[in-house]
Image: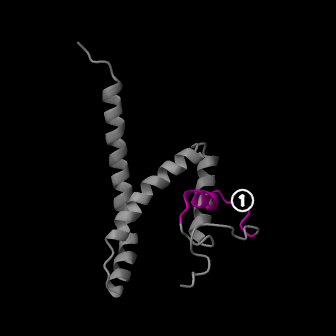
Amino acid sequence: MTPIRGVGPAQDHDEVEHGVSRARDLVRTRGWQVDLRDPVLDRLDAAWLACDHAGLGLDERRMHGYAAAVERVAETDVDSVPSEPHAAVRHVVLGTVLVDPVLAALRRLAQQNVAVSRHRTSRPEST
């Protein structure tokens, strides 16, 4: 089987054109099989830098936590793709557009749940 150029475990890439890429370092460290030329990596670098400039503190540990969470989401996504090619393309395209807002809403609801749960367990009981 001939490997597809640029796809496989994230390894060396001519990063002269990209400079230092924390996104590429992240996918390498996680062993993700992605094309290191994918412009999504550049968008991730830009978004990560914007968070740095805003002082949000997205360090490596936090990014690995997010990456682990989205790996589970990706598994759910891929598991739901139909095997028939036409249906698969439709599912992936529509799923990307329509499910992203669903995931964002679920994240916000989960944040509320975690914040309330932690607040309740950290408060001393009143007598």
Q: Secondary structure at mark 1?
A: loop
Residue at 57%, 75% in the rendered image? 7
Q: Does residue 19 show up magenta in the picture?
A: yes
Place of residue 70 in the rendered image (x, y in percent of width and height, measured from the top left): 44, 57
Residue 112 quadrant: top left
Place of residue 14 in the rendered image (x, y in percent of width and height, measured from the top left): 73, 71
Q: How many marks?
A: 1
Determine which residue is flagged by label 1: 20
Left or right of 52? Residue 70 is left
Q: Amino acid at mark 1?
A: Val
Q: Is residue 48 above or below residue 80?
A: above
Q: Is residue 117 above or below residue 74?
A: above
Residue at 71%, 66% in the rendered image? 18
Q: Does residue 101 show up magenta in the picture?
A: no
Place of residue 40 in the rendered image (x, y in percent of width and height, measured from the top left): 56, 68
Left or right of 16? Residue 33 is left
The range drawn in magenta is 17-32
